[in-house]
Image: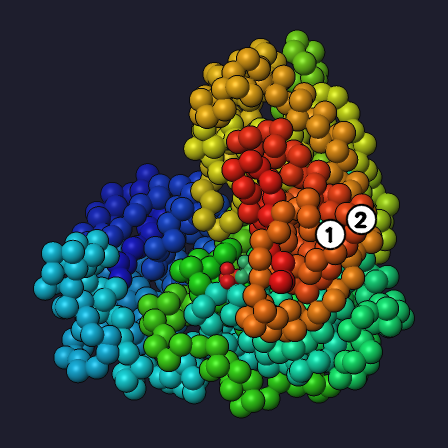
Amino acid sequence: MTRSTVLVALDTEKTGPVARDQLARICERLGAEGHEVVRARGADDALALTQSRADLSVAVVSWDLDAPEAVLKALMGRFTKLPVFLVTTAASVDDLPLWVSQVISGYVWLLEDTPDFIAGRIGVAARRYLDGLLPPFFRELRRFDDAHEYSWHTPAHAGGVAFLKSPVGRAFYDYYGERLFRTDLSISVGELGSLFEHSGPIGDAERNAARVFGADLTYFVLHGDSTADRIACHASIATDELVLVDRNCHKAIYHGLTLTGGRPVYLVPTRNGYGLMGPVPPAAMREDAVAARVDRSPFTASAAGRRPVYAVITNSTYDGLCYDAVRVAELLGATVPRLHLDEAWFAYARFHPIYARRYGMSVDAAALPDDVRPTVFSTQSTHKLLAAMSQSSMVHVKNSPRSPVDHRQFNETFMMHATTSPMYPMIAGLDVAAAMMDGPDGRWLTDEAITEAIRFRQAVARIGRRIREAADRPDWFFGTWQPTEVTDPATGEVHAFLDAPLDLLRTEPSCWVLAPGAAWHGFAGMEDGFCLLDPVKVTITCPGVNAAGEVSDPGIPARILTMYLETRGIVVEKTDAYTCLILFSMGITKGKWGTLLDAMLDFKALYDANAPLAEVLPDLVRAHPGQYARLTLPDLAARMHAQLGRSDLTGLLDEAFTHPTPAVLTPAQAYQRLIRGGTEPVRLADIAGRTAATMVVTTPPGIPVLMPGESTGEAGGPVLRYLRALEAFDREFPGFPSETHGVTRSTAGDYHITCLR
Ligand SMILES: *Cc1c(COP(=O)(O)O)cnc(C)c1O
């Protein structure tokens, strides 16, 4: 039984003793029937409870409160279909605003009815609300669990009983509790439907998710967005066909190409002075630009057809840059009939108006005419930024008549990548994740994350200003990456970001757009409105470089800040040369960022006081006393800053992407060579002219510098010069290794990369 909570918002001071006694009896009665009653004495109390108590199942609100309309609006804005009873006098019902009579479920006349009758009506409404709350699969799973059947099918733990026969099994069972195991059922339970036939409650749950996410078809995938990506590719690309691939793509896309034999033609994102990857610029997506790239590709001559059949774009990027998806579909749709937006980090986009047009499922017939619109796939790691268990993911499809997805055909691919023993609690989790975003709840949940992220951004900027104005200490501070000023489109008024009204920033997308040529973002080739910085993905900037790549002193490379934050129990999402990324997700609690801000201020104090490293980063000094024991925090920062400047990592990286090494083999051919011819690790110093067997991804910027089947190029070429500079950095600063995938280090610090034999 789900708990039921009744909010009673009524000021008993105003009602007089008879009504007060009556109310006390109603609350007593509700308590006796198992409802928890929470009381609010005024509108402020009621508003606070509305925000903090997600478990309300009915509200009783007095029209005598100081601001009853605000309370009703808050309840409607927070909960879908929450029953609300209005306490008033029969005489004043006629005078209520019309919208009030429409949204409430009924009236309570305290003095006219008996307490039992009133409590009964409230209780029934609460129960009905809770019954209607549960989404299709979770509801049936609970009902099934309640029935306590004996099972003769897999899984063999049989509702957990098998674990009870062994001490270690018992420990496992006790740890997770009985319920997880009782609902871990086999597909033989027909009542719950089938994930492969998309039938019964499972099919209903997928269709409900399709409605919530705005898709024509939605498929639940239990093996991560990695699998969702491979399914979308595998269902769309035939052997030797050309595919447009965002160079900033996840490994899974490469795996999709390996499975299908697709031939990648890369679209390369822009870079800025921080070394952050931006969007692929619109000019590179145009039909003529794409055709020129296709012509230059070594894979085109022997491809099946000269026109790409599919395009994959990562939306949003890791750093929170999201495209105008409709514009991308229009541009790439001129070349390909199917567009895949990998939205691993962006499942919440549909639920807040700030992201209008920014996500795959917004590309519908109303946004683009059928003859130019591609069929769009959105693949989402539901678990990454919504509330769902790890691995839980979805594929959404928005069909266009140009190349519609045929469910029966797509399902063949879907099954090829699925287990025949899906875990039902995960399906329930996906069902619940979708239901949580339905109606006003989705807006409320995303709005909270956006609001907290903006508060943090403004707090950092305001502290920076206070430090400068006080002029009693070195005037540097960290920043966050966003526009320096914003314009209110309604009034034309321009605000400095740090003083802009919160309501403007959290509702007005134009505040977050990468305007063409604006200095703060540093990306070339933007069209107005093309790309938006997602407020919830916050990049912290350290002194030392700006978005144009201009180096300044003092410099504090971000790896030092990240290491310090770790000593304070704060783990960031990603660290680049002078920036690190933190996420404001739905799991954030209000004000959690206070701790982070405090740690940033402490770092500044330590830096300004020239604190010895042994005090700031004791573990580092203990592990590498030779290098670090005599240094202070500013010494280390200055050395690392000088090294980064000397080696010009960001410049080399830019060159490596502008002049990529030639591809020798397609991903599928490279893979065949890998399983037949084998691979060997090769020292970076000896690697010129070889062919990479695995992806080499360096951070920054977290996108591949080498793909399997690509030549490593000449020793003096940009890719190898860049990798050697990274190797030199790692040698000079032990304890701060670059995050480079596809590279192993020998004990002497030499990089090794796996190449085809
Ligand atoms: C994380 C990620 C994936 C894979 O998602 P999982 O759910 O971890 O399998 C795919 N694409 C992108 C862009 C990602 O960041």
Is 253 placed above or below 136 here? above
Give the number of the disc on residue 688. Answer: 1
Is 580 placed above or below 213 here? above
Q: How far apart, in angstroms, are the residues tagged by discs 1 and 2?
A: 9 Å
In the image, is 127 to the left or to the right of 510?
left
Q: Quadrant of residue 580?
A: top right
Please state which amino acid type lies under the numbered disc 1: Ala
Reading the image, the residue beneath label 2 is: 717
- In the orientation shown, which residue stands out farthest toward the left? 165
Q: Residues within 10 Å of mark 1 (few under 14, many from 20)?
A: some
Tell me which numbered mark, 1 or 2, is placed earlier along the sequence: 1
Residue at x-position 58% and y-position 11% = 609
Where does the C terminus fall, quadrant-wise? bottom right
Is 680 placed above or below 628 here? below
Instruction: Tell me residue 547's x, y (percent).
Output: 77, 38
Please state which amino acid type lies under the numbered disc 2: Gly
Residue at x-position 35% and y-position 41% = 41
In the image, is 290 to the left or to the right of 503?
right
Q: Quadrant of residue 367?
A: bottom right
CB-based contact (under 8 Å), mark 1 and mark 2: yes
Residue 285 in sight from this viewpoint: yes
Mark 1, ligand 1, within 8 Å: the answer is no
Residue 559 in sight from this viewpoint: no
Is 339 placed above or below 560 here? below
In the image, is 291 to the left or to the right of 17?
right
Instruction: Tell me residue 644's x, y (percent).
Output: 71, 31
